[in-house]
Image (cartoon, rainbow, N blue to C red):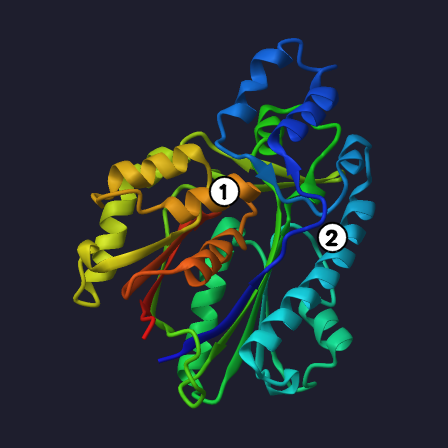
């Protein structure tokens, strides 16, 4: 089965405390929110300690046009994608020319040619590399991208697939949007970049993490639950307070039916690699899934240290399992995103 050869994640040089982010939001929103002091409790209630930002905090205090922010998105995405990829290639012990496929996942900026083309050009990857740029999956993109990488490597045993997930949520912040959703988003979202290399069977299994199967699901009549509203000023974040309820009602049956297809039950999963979403989403998972202990500890820790980085977040969680230890057995990756939708990946994880 396809295996994960290496994974890397980026810590930006502008990581800030949640208290600093709260103070910045207070300055920005105070003119339009007379009860700003009461609303600031949202920041304290996130269980986030630090946020991973790609720009200095002062950048967000000033208004920027969509064109300016998107130009920053392209430049920063390219710079840190290359850094993450170089770390991944070195860890996998391969030559960059050996990469056969590249999947680039992002929903927080626009670029044509797509960022994967910019990466190939800058790094001088093989000119015949197969390209798959993916836009619009939001927080579900990391799991979906991993699924597609595994599927490609399963179809071609000689494949070396590079997955890059980039979200610069902070560069979508609308300085003059005083809506509640924008305020709540300013307490939660941050920036992240991750890269993975997944190899087909004709290559050695280095990290002993194998891709077994995947499942996607779109929930009918929930298109307005999460997404963007595209304005002349930029991307306006949209997310419903119903998200935790949707998860509570569906996650148990979705997970168990997926596992049953592979003759497994919930008790067979030893490593739960979940995208955090937020505090209420984590509560929905823990209440709906009858799993003993704090099975989402790594997920909670990544959210506390970085905030919600959208699609790369689950890959940060996966990297935490690999670098700090996991249990021998099956792993389950899960994330929710616009649609409203869910993405799942089943892994076999063995240290020996």
Left or right of residue 239, residue 233 in this image: right
Relative to the observer, which residue lies in front, 278 or 222?
278
Relative to the observer, which residue lies in front, 342 or 315?
315
In the rendered view, would you say 163 is above or below 101? above
Distance, label 2 to label 1, CA atoms, is 22 Å
* Residue 290, quarter of the rendered image: top left
Q: Residues within 10 Å of mark 2 (few under 14, many from 20)?
A: many
In the rendered view, would you say 121 is above or below 104? below
Q: Quadrant of the N terminus?
A: bottom left
Task: Say what secondary structure mark 2 lies in.
Answer: helix
What residue is pinned by disc 1?
303
Q: Where is residue 265 drawn, in percent x and y?
A: 17, 58
In the rendered view, would you say 66 is above or below 217? above
* Residue 293, quarter of the rendered image: top left
Residue in view at x 67 percent, y 29 percent: 20
Q: Where is residue 101 drawn, in percent x and y?
A: 57, 79
Residue in view at x 49 percent, y 64 percent: 145
Decide: marks 2, 1 in contact (CB < 8 A)? no
Residue in view at x 43 percent, y 58 percent: 324
> Can residue 134 be seen at all in this image of the molecule?
no
What residue is pinned by disc 2?
73
Task: Say what secondary structure mark 1 lies in.
Answer: helix
> Can residue 238 be seen at all in this image of the molecule?
yes
Q: Residue furthest top?
A: 34
Left or right of residue 256, residue 66 in this image: right
Q: Residues within 10 Å of mark 1 (few under 14, many from 20)?
A: many
Q: Quadrant of the C terminus?
A: bottom left
Q: Where is residue 12 drawn, in percent x and y?
A: 68, 50
The disc, 2 or 1, on the residue closer to the chain's N-terminal end is 2
Relative to the observer, which residue lies in front, 28 or 68?
28
Label at residue 244: none
* Residue 129, quarter of the rendered image: bottom right
């Amino acid at each position: 089965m396809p295996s994960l050869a290496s994974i890397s994640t980026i810590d930006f040089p502008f990581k800030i405390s949640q208290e600093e982010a709260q103070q910045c939001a207070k300055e920005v929103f105070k003119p339009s929110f007379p009860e700003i002091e009461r609303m600031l409790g949202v920041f304290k209630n996130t269980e986030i300690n630090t946020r991973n930002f790609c720009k200095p905090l002062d950048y967000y205090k000033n208004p920027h046009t969509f064109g300016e922010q998107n130009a920053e998105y392209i430049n920063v995405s390219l710079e840190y994608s290359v850094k993450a990829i170089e770390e991944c290639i070195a860890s996998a012990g391969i030559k960059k020319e050996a990469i056969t496929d590249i999947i680039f996942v992002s929903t927080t900026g626009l670029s044509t040619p797509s960022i994967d083309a910019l990466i190939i050009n800058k790094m001088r990857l093989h000119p015949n590399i197969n390209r798959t740029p993916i836009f619009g999956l939001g927080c579900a993109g990391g799991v979906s991208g991993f699924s597609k990488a595994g599927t490609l490597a399963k179809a071609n045993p000689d494949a070396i697939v590079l997955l890059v997930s980039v979200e610069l949520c902070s560069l979508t912040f609308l300085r003059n949007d005083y809506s509640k959703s924008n305020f709540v988003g300013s307490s939660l979202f941050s920036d992240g970049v991750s890269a993975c290399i997944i190899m087909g069977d004709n290559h050695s299994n280095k990290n002993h993490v194998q891709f077994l199967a995947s499942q996607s699901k779109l929930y009918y009549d929930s298109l307005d639950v999460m997404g963007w509203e595209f304005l002349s000023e930029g991307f306006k974040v949209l997310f419903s307070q119903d998200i935790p309820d949707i998860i509570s009602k569906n996650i148990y049956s979705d997970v168990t039916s997926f596992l049953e297809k592979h003759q497994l039950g919930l008790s067979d999963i030893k490593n739960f690699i979940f995208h955090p979403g937020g505090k209420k989403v984590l509560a929905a998972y823990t209440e709906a899934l009858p799993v003993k202990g704090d099975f989402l500890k790594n997920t909670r820790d990544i959210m506390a240290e970085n905030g919600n980085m959208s699609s790369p977040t689950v890959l940060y969680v996966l990297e935490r399992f690999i670098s700090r230890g996991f249990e021998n057995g099956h792993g389950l990756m899960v994330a929710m995103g616009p649609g409203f939708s869910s993405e799942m990946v089943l892994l076999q994880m063995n240290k020996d």
